């Protein structure tokens, strides 16, 4: 019964999506307020019904209702409750339901918080959201219905892949989808603007918070997945340029470009058609990612329940959504002209350079990811494009972007002074040099490129600090004035500084972990020790420990440095009887400068265990940096200018209002 | 990365990859073996290198790579040995050949095209565009006058 | 103005090309890797026989003068479930007079003998490749794989995966016929 309610919720949501995408649009064209009012109502209704459907599926998982095919295939009664719940989106059908639920969430958010938008724009944005929802709800109902029943329910389910029974993974997909799907709002704003034939500074101000929110979620979501792969797969790495990883990175690159170009539209009323195009691209790349991951056209480590028929359906959706919006773009974009003067040495010039490099980087990753497919379709030749290609092409494109990132914010709008900006960055230059030399020496003269990468990170970090210091006149005005300037600084400015500093921290982590990782593989018996990067790892042996739905062999290492205890690491090898599979649980001790990482794999015939121990320098910085980036995004999101619906208050008004409250 | 989730169902077991007994005694040779293995694709697992995979074939190939190195082959010869059997497909770093020209030179072409597009755009806008604007037509002038007149009225 | 309109239509044109490619991609199998050995001589090898199933074979056995006809080399294992589905086709071809050699891949001799006793033996000779070393020389990356070697000892075709349907079998027989030309 509950499952039928869920199914019914899906159907009702589909009906509402139909309404949302048609009548209000006609109402907006004819100036019919009654029809237009249907849009926000339908968007809210869609959220309610999809929430209901999602709750119904979650319920079926929690109570282990194996008469629902999806539950029987992906759950098991002996699974801990947390993984029963996260198992809802641990499979194709359930994850698609989460996808449309989040789409409806963004639609409802526009309906609720879009009060300051012109009514026709809001209604058109909602209509486009409705169309996307309509397509994907059809997809779910026709090809991937999670509520299908089994005539003969099995006694128990097949269980969830043990690798996915992990807290890190519980939150990876929701964040990722909040990012992916969040770009649908930017897309809808772009299409709505094309329908209206008008892109204004106000439009850019409205579209920015939605993009920021999606970008922050996607940033965190990608990092969560990467973090999970790092500690769960036991290979000591965190990124492999796998097609599925790239599929999430492409919208991120486009979204990052969009964030920056929207500022130019807002401040300078130019780059309009490019910004609209980026908004279309960011979501289109999310959609293409969905297609790549679910259709089976590319091979990935992360093999998927692949189904060409579903692939075909998604492809048709892609053609309608992307093809349709780009056709509209071809017709309408030529009218989006701007007469603003554009000086190359200026803030907008720097943002344009940022866009140029990010777009090229995005195109490069896209080319590398899809090249095997292109080549085979044209010539029957097979080729592999692996990490060496991406490292060789992506890094040289993104490095100059990091250089420019420190300079851009110091240039004024309209007409900047490059010489002055550079002269203020002397301290960043010094930091870059210092960090590069220091890391070169610390690494024992190993890896000049990596040392340069570290220098770049230092440059960027100090560059962000210099920019902040400039804004608050640190050391050039009395400290009190600097503090009050810091308080008065718009949140968006703080957000930028924080996010840029976060990028610098990530860059340092990526560089160091890539270049100076130490790995040691050996067979060990209890009592053996091994020296890795100055730490002594002593193997204390393995004992069997029961888990809720698995049995673990837990190894123990005591780690010492110069005779002083540092940590006890307990990596596990777990066996899940339901799935008849092993998983590896790496044990990680972080010193914040490096991770000590230990994995046990197999006992040999002679009773010695294969162990691998890694010293991964600065890997924690990757995660810290990403969190800082996400915080920067969130901080910027709280800027008063973005607060939808809030009237702009001047400081005088705010001051006057305070006593009145007292 | 989304499918990290669903994934790994069939192929990627948690990596145990290189086993202690495979490792060569000579660290220099072993380092070369690792470097070669990292750029060779494991065919069975599709998108992992043989260095990262615990598939049997990957293990066989790792051992083979080491045997060839011990026998005195150069890195190049070892890679050619594997390519002769499995084709260019095993190379995670695709060789520059006519059919990968677009792959390798594509990014440069994209950058040049995009940069010249930007240069053109900025070049045209470095000065106010209004100066070159077409003169108003008689009709437009009349309309402006009408608007201005309206504004002047109290 | 014309140039501008073309410019703004470029993304659409690019996407249409992409969509066509993606659609073509749906019909392709990314797991099927073409052999690097097509039209190359079969590798040099000798394999020992399976005890109780005759002697093994080597490179010279595949080509003239040992064989005046095209031969099929099938890589199989008793633990390979798809091989079981393929086996009846091999039996039928053997009856039709196709010469089939078997490479027994990473198998236990007892299991292999049981397999042949149960399902029949379509092979002229069987070579045991216990450590898969010869199979690597053949570029094998999974079982079953089936090669066609012509009279001059050159590999003409490789089928990856089992031949389990009449269509696949017919296509394979056509490849044999072509190699006989």
Image (cartoon, coloured by chain):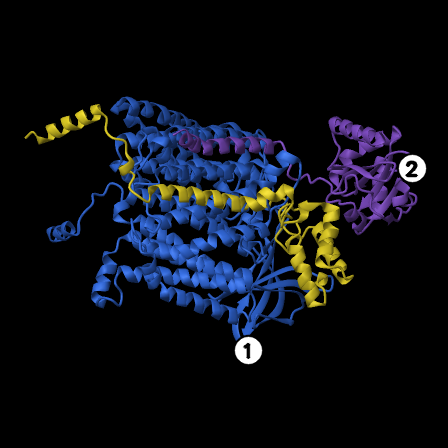
Which residue corresponds to the image point at 11% horizontal and 28% vertical from the top-left? Answer: B149
Q: Residues within 10 Å of mark 2 (few under 14, many from 20)?
A: some
Chain corresponding to blue in the figure:
A
Corner quadrant of residue A308: top right
Q: Which residue is mark 1?
A: A563
Q: Chain of mark 1?
A: A
Q: Chain B: what color?
A: yellow
- Percent x, y for residue A455? 46, 64
The residue nearer to you, when weighing A38 against C28, is: C28
Q: Which residue is mark 2?
A: C67
Q: In the rendered view, tell whether residue A306 sits above or below residue A552.
A: above
Q: Chain of mark 2?
A: C
Chain corresponding to purple in the figure:
C
Q: In the rendered view, tell whether residue A318 sits above or below residue A415.
A: above
Q: Residue furthest left?
A: B154
Q: Is residue A532 left or right of residue C51?
A: left
Corner quadrant of residue A534: bottom right
The residue nearer to you, when weighing C162 against A605, is: C162
Res. A61 in view: yes
Q: Residue furthest bottom?
A: A563
Q: In the rendered view, tell whether residue C27 sits above or below residue C75.
A: above
Secondary structure at numbered mark 2 = loop
Which residue corresponds to the image point at 48% horizontal and 46% vertical from the top-left? Answer: B111
Q: Is residue A98 left or right of residue A540?
A: left
């Amino acid at each position: 019964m509950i499952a039928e309610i869920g199914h019914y919720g899906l159907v009702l949501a589909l009906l509402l999506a139909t309404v949302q995408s048609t009548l209000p649009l006609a109402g907006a064209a004819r100036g019919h307020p009654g029809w237009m009012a249907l849009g926000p109502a339908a968007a809210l209704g869609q959220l309610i019904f999809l929430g209901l459907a999602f709750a119904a599926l979650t319920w079926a998982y929690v109570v282990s209702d194996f008469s629902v095919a999806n539950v029987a295939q992906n759950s098991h009664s002996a699974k801990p409750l947390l993984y029963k719940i996260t198992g809802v989106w641990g499979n194709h059908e359930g994850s698609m339901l989460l996808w449309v639920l989040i789409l409806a969430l963004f639609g409802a958010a526009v309906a609720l918080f879009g009060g300051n938008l012109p009514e026709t724009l809001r209604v058109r944005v909602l209509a486009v959201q409705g169309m996307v929802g309509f397509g994907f709800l059809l997809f779910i109902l026709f090809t991937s219905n999670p509520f299908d029943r089994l005539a003969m329910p099995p006694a128990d389910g097949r269980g969830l892949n043990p690798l996915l029974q992990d807290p890190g993974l519980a939150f990876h997909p929701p964040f990722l989808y909040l990012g992916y799907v969040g770009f649908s709002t930017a897309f809808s704003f772009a299409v709505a603007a094309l329908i209206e034939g008008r892109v204004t500074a106000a439009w850019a101000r409205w579209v920015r918070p939605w993009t920021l929110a999606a970008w922050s979620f996607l940033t965190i979501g990608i990092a969560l997945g990467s973090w999970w792969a790092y500690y769960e797969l036991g290979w000591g790495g965190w990124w492999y340029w796998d097609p599925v990883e790239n599929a999430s990175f492409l919208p991120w690159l486009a979204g990052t470009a969009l964030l920056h170009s929207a500022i130019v539209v807002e401040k300078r009323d130019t780059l309009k058609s490019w910004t609209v195009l980026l908004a279309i691209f960011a979501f289109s790349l999310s959609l293409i990612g969905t297609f790549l991951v679910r259709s089976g056209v590319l091979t990935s480590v992360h093999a998927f329940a692949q189904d060409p028929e579903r692939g075909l359906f998604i492809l048709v959706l892609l053609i309608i959504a992307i093809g349709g919006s780009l056709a509209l773009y071809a017709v309408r974009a030529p009218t989006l002209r701007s007469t603003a003067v554009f000086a190359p040495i200026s803030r907008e010039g720097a943002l344009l350079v940022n866009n140029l490099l990010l777009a090229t980087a995005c195109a490069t990753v896209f080319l590398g990811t899809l090249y095997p497919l292109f080549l085979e379709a044209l010539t029957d030749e097979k080729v592999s494009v692996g990490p060496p290609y991406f490292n060789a092409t992506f890094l040289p494109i993104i490095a100059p972007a990091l250089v420019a990132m420190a300079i851009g914010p110091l240039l004024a709008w309209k007409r900047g002074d490059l010489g002055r900006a550079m002269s203020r960055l002397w301290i960043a230059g010094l930091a870059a040099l210092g960090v590069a030399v220091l890391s070169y020496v610390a690494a024992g003269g190993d890896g000049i490129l990596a040392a340069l990468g570290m220098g770049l990170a230092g440059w960027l970090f100090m560059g962000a600090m210099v920019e902040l210091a400039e804004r608050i006149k640190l050391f050039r005005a009395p400290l009190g004035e600097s503090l009050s300037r810091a308080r008065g600084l718009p949140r968006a400015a703080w957000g930028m500084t924080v996010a840029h500093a976060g990028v610098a921290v990530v860059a340092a982590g990526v560089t160091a972990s890539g270049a100076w990782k130490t790995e040691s593989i050996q067979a060990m018996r209890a009592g053996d020790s091994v020296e890795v990067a100055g730490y002594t790892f002593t193997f204390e042996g393995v004992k069997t420990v029961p888990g809720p739905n698995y049995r673990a062999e837990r190894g123990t290492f005591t780690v010492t440095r110069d005779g002083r205890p540092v940590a006890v690491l307990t990596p596990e090898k777990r066996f899940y009887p339901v799935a008849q599979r092993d998983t590896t649980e790496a044990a990680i001790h972080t010193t914040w400068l490096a991770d000590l990482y230990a994995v046990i794999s197999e006992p040999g015939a002679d009773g010695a265990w294969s162990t691998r121990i890694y010293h991964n320098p600065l890997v924690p910085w990757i995660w810290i940096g990403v969190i800082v980036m996400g915080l920067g995004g969130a901080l910027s999101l709280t800027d008063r200018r973005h607060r939808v619906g809030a009237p702009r208050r001047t400081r005088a008004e705010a001051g006057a209002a305070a006593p009145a409250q007292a | 990365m989304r499918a990290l989730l669903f994934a790994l169902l069939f192929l990627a077991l948690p990596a145990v990859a290189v086993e202690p007994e495979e490792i060569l005694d000579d660290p220099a040779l072993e380092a070369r073996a690792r470097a070669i293995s990292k750029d060779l694709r494991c065919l069975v697992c599709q998108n992992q290198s043989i260095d990262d995979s615990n598939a049997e074939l990957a293990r066989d190939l790792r051992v083979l790579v080491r045997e060839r190195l011990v026998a005195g082959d150069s890195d190049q010869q070892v890679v050619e040995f594997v390519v002769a059997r499995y084709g260019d497909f095993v190379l995670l770093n695709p060789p520059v050949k006519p059919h990968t020209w677009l792959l390798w030179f594509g990014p440069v072409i994209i950058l040049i095209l995009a940069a010249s597009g930007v240069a053109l755009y900025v070049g045209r806008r470095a000065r106010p565009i209004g100066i070159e604007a077409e003169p108003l037509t008689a009709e437009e002038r009349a309309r402006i006058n009408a608007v201005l007149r309206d504004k002047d009225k109290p | 103005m014309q140039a501008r309109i073309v410019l703004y239509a470029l993304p659409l044109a690019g996407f249409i090309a992409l969509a066509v490619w993606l659609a073509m991609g749906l019909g392709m199998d990314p797991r099927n890797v073409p052999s690097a050995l097509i039209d190359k001589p079969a590798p040099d090898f000798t394999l020992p026989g399976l005890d109780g199933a005759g002697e093994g074979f080597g490179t010279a056995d595949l080509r003239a003068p040992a064989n005046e006809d095209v031969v099929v080399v099938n890589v199989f294992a008793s633990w390979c479930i798809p091989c079981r589905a393929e086996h009846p086709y091999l039996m039928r071809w053997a009856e039709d007079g196709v010469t089939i050699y078997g490479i027994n891949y990473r198998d236990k001799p007892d299991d292999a003998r049981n397999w042949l006793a149960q399902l029949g033996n379509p092979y002229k000779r069987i070579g045991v490749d216990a450590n898969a070393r010869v199979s690597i020389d053949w570029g094998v990356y999974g079982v079953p794989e089936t090669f066609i070697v012509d009279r001059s000892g050159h590999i003409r075709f490789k089928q990856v995966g089992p031949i389990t349907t009449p269509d696949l079998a017919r296509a394979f027989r056509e490849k044999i016929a072509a190699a006989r030309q």
